[in-house]
Image: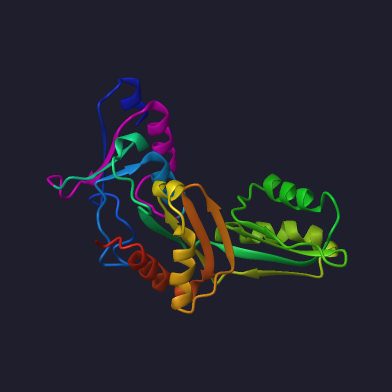
Amino acid sequence: VAIAGAIEADVCEIYTDVDGIYTTDPRIEPKAKKLEKISYDEMLELASLGAKVLQNRSVEMAKKLNVNLVSRSSFTPEVEGTLITKEENIMEKPVVSGIALDKNQVRVGMYGVTDKPGIAASIFTSLADADINVDMIVQTVGVDGATDLDFTIPTTDLEICKNVMKNFEKDARKIDYNESICKVSIVGVGMKSHTGVASKAFSSLAKENINIRIISTSEIKVSMIIDEKYAELAVRSLHEAYSLDK
């Protein structure tokens, strides 16, 4: 991608073992459809949220250098791939473009944390110093001088995180770790201009009796932490809710 940007190429084609970017993992939802086009920002979100087709850095560089990327297959070169391009090159912006699933998540719960200025800064600075990438964070309103703090980290950082958390055992009534969770996310640039996108996701999971533990949103994504045993059911349910198989 860097070379393509340097020589101002019209397009940079990336050949992998899949023939493009799909609305979700076809191994989970057989009705997943291949996308013709997707924006850089959507692809970055999907890549960081669990989709493994393209490396984050390559998409970041393509956006920075204004390089049109095409993801296609080495095994079926005759099949048109997916174009990753600028948002303004996508005429009809779908409300939701894709659904990503990330099972590489651990939820760390700190209960009865001393509610005083600087405690969160101290915890997250220590985690950052240990090179632990904290993803989603939820803190409850303090009651009687104590608060609850939940955050998620990659599974690979769990043992390092436990060592860091030993320094804060005196500041909390209890600290626990839940590895039986996953993060399911919906992504789409159309969210910026449509209402009710998040509520449809919550309703879809509620219909399947799936409890949402943590929610995180941005302009173009909604991520939800749920129990891992419901991972594939949640993906299929959301895929149907947003009619991504149409």
From where the camera sits, is residue 55 visible? no
| Whether residue 128 is situated above or below residue 166 in the rendered picture | above
Q: Residue 86: x and y, percent?
A: 35, 35
In front of the other: 76 or 121: 121
Region rendered in magenta: 50-78
- Extreme residue toward the bottom, this view: 209
Q: What residue lies at 36% left-to-right and 55% top-to-bottom?
A: 98
Residue at image coords 46%, 53%: 49
Q: Residue at x 44, y 78 (%)?
A: 208
Please tell me which residue lies in front, 3 or 238. Answer: 238
Up the image or down, 166 lies above or below 35; here it is below
Q: Is residue 238 visible?
A: yes
Write the residue at 49% across / 64% down: 199
Where is residue 243 drawn, in percent x and y?
Answer: 31, 63
Q: Answer left or right for 70 relative to 164.
A: left
Task: Tell me the quadrant of the picture where the N terminus can be found.
Answer: top left
| Percent coordinates x, y for residue 173 in the rendering | 82, 70
Image position, residue 93 (x, y; %): 33, 46
Choose top left, top right, bottom left or bottom right for residue 143. bottom right
Q: Is residue 17 left or right of residue 24?
A: left
Picture quadrant of residue 51:
bottom left
* Image quarter in which the C terminus is found: bottom left
